[in-house]
Image (cartoon, rainbow, N blue to C red):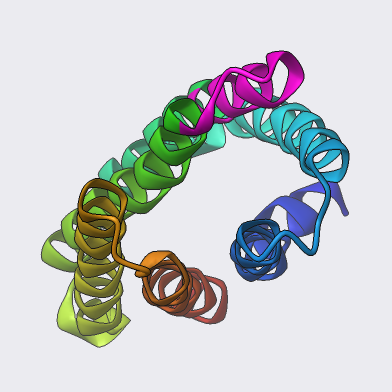
Amino acid sequence: MLRRVRETAPAGLVPLAWTFAALAHLEVASPHTALVAHVVMDVVLVAFAALSWRDMQTHPVLRAWLAVIVVGAGVTLVGTYALATDGGETLLRATVFAWMVVPAVALGYTGRVLPREEADWVYTVGGVLSGVGALAFLYGSVGGVALALPAIALAGVGQTAGILNAVVQY
């Protein structure tokens, strides 16, 4: 049962995380709620990496996604630190940006490595959407343009498409 949860839970957790990011940006979620969510994500990411380590060494694509989980755990810890210490908007924005870029790279890699019959194009399109979201987020952060929500939506849609395809395929 635990294996099945590890294989399917990300299909719900990825869109949930991006929905929560949008709500936090809209200030619907309080900073304390965001801190609690980050602590939960820290625990889930570390547990997932530890429990899946051996299984995710069996294929180059799985190793790439294990790297996303490990890097993501570090990124999320930075966000947790920023929220716990009032570390500032820059660290929080860096956390969101990293969660857009790192999976975008892995999605692009996945689309390049997997065969066509495994719907490689879904990963490629997902990577492009997440990457465009990251660029929009960065541009909005630097230029003061209100692009955070569209950027979060692009990254969320792209990454959700990729994880849903992975769950359906496997």
x 22%, y 50%: residue: 105
Residue 146, image x, y percentages: 37, 69
- Dominant secondary structure (helix, strand or loop) of the stretch shown in magenta: helix
Left or right placement of residue 124 versus residue 44 in this view:
left
Residue 104 falls in which quadrant of the image? bottom left
Judge whether 41 appears above or below 50 on screen. Answer: below
Residue 150, image x, y percentages: 40, 77
Residue 46 counted in the magenta span: no
x 77%, y 43%: residue: 34
Q: Nearer the viewer, residue 44 or 18?
A: 18
Residue 71 falls in which quadrant of the image? top left
Judge whether 36 appears above or below 142 on screen. Answer: above
Left or right placement of residue 121 versus residue 85 in this view:
left
The boundaries of the magenta stretch are: 75-89
x 86%, y 44%: residue: 33
Left or right placement of residue 169 versus residue 158 in this view:
right
Residue 108 visible at all: yes
Residue 131, image x, y percentages: 22, 61
Residue 62 visible at all: no
Residue 78 counted in the magenta span: yes
Q: Quadrant of the N terminus?
A: bottom right
Q: Nearer the viewer, residue 110 or 94?
A: 94
Judge whether 57 appears above or below 120 on screen. Answer: above
